[in-house]
């Protein structure tokens, strides 16, 4: 399932329906903590985003993204539990407002979460209650963000989204985005 999502995200990067490659960005994601296999999910996440413009005005974008979260590790005298979380999104983003150096965007789309829990007993007693676990969930997400102008080729993006899934959570993201064309030209109406 995760492979299919990654392949879908990569495929969407190569779309050429009268659109232009707009920008690429990377940064940090901070998700609300969920319990998983008696542990938690880790923070922060490292994310990469790609904006593919769907109209000439540059107000509608297809935005695939992938986030890999820092593992959560629990060590006791009897075991080591490590939880991993990966998130993939495919969002449609619309620029609601753009004035000078600030843009406000709204977005929504599909979200996929992969959770992996690696359990290693340090002392084997035969009565272990935990085991390795792996789960995948598909859901949706809704969010909004600010695009703050830094230079003709760079923006700072701050966003918040709510993931609707078996493991629902709020995710705050901060990314630096690099424009392949100058921002002023991309936002001309």
Image (cartoon, rainbow, N blue to C red):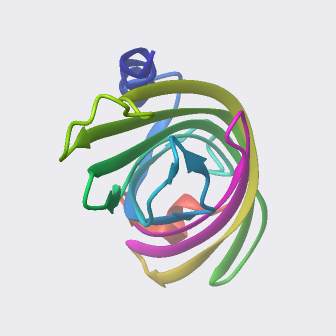
Instruction: Identify the residue at horizontal 33%, vertical 59% (top origin).
Output: 73
Q: As displayed, is residue 103 above or below residue 169?
A: below
Image-quadrant location for residue 101: bottom right
Q: Start and end of the magenta stretch?
A: 153-176
Q: Quadrant of the N terminus?
A: top left
| 36 or 7: nearer the viewer | 36
Magenta stretch encompasses residue 115: no
| 27 or 29: nearer the viewer | 29
**Image-based side of 47 in relation to 113, left or right:** left
Which residue is situated farthest in the right direction here?
A: 96
Query: What secondary structure is the magenta-colored segment mainly?
Result: strand
Instruction: Identify the residue at horizontal 23%, vertical 40% (top origin).
Output: 120
**Image-based side of 31 in relation to 93, left or right:** left
Image-quadrant location for residue 24: bottom left
Magenta stretch encompasses residue 166: yes
Instruction: Identify the residue at horizontal 53%, vertical 81% (top origin).
Output: 149
Tally of marks: 0
**Image-based side of 104 in relation to 69, left or right:** right
Q: Quadrant of the C terminus?
A: bottom right
**Image-based side of 124 in relation to 169, left or right:** left
Instruction: Identify the residue at horizontal 37%, vertical 61% (top origin).
Output: 26
Q: As displayed, is residue 165 above or below residue 3?
A: below
Please state the horizontal and vertical placement of residue 184, each as a whole percent of the image: 53, 71
| 55 or 147: nearer the viewer | 147
Please state the horizontal and vertical placement of residue 147, each as a whole percent of the image: 61, 72
Please state the horizontal and vertical placement of residue 176, each as a whole percent of the image: 41, 71
């Amino acid at each position: 399932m995760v492979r299919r999502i990654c392949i879908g995200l990569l495929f969407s990067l190569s779309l050429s329906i009268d659109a232009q490659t707009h920008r690429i960005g990377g940064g940090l994601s901070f998700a609300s903590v969920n319990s998983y296999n008696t542990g938690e999910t880790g923070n922060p996440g490292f994310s990469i985003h790609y904006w593919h413009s769907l109209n000439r005005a540059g107000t509608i974008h297809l935005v695939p993204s992938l986030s890999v979260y820092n593992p959560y590790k629990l060590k006791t005298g009897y075991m080591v539990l490590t939880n991993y979380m990966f998130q993939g999104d495919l969002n449609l983003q619309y620029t609601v407002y753009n004035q000078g150096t600030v843009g406000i965007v709204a977005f929504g789309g599909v979200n996929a979460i992969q959770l992996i829990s690696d359990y290693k007993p340090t002392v084997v007693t035969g009565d272990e209650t935990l085991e390795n676990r792996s789960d995948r969930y598909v859901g949706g997400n809704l969010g909004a963000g600010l695009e703050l102008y830094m230079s003709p080729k760079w923006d700072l993006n701050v966003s918040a989204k709510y993931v609707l899934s078996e493991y629902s959570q709020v995710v705050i993201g901060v990314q630096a985005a690099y424009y392949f064309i100058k921002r002023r030209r991309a936002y001309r109406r």
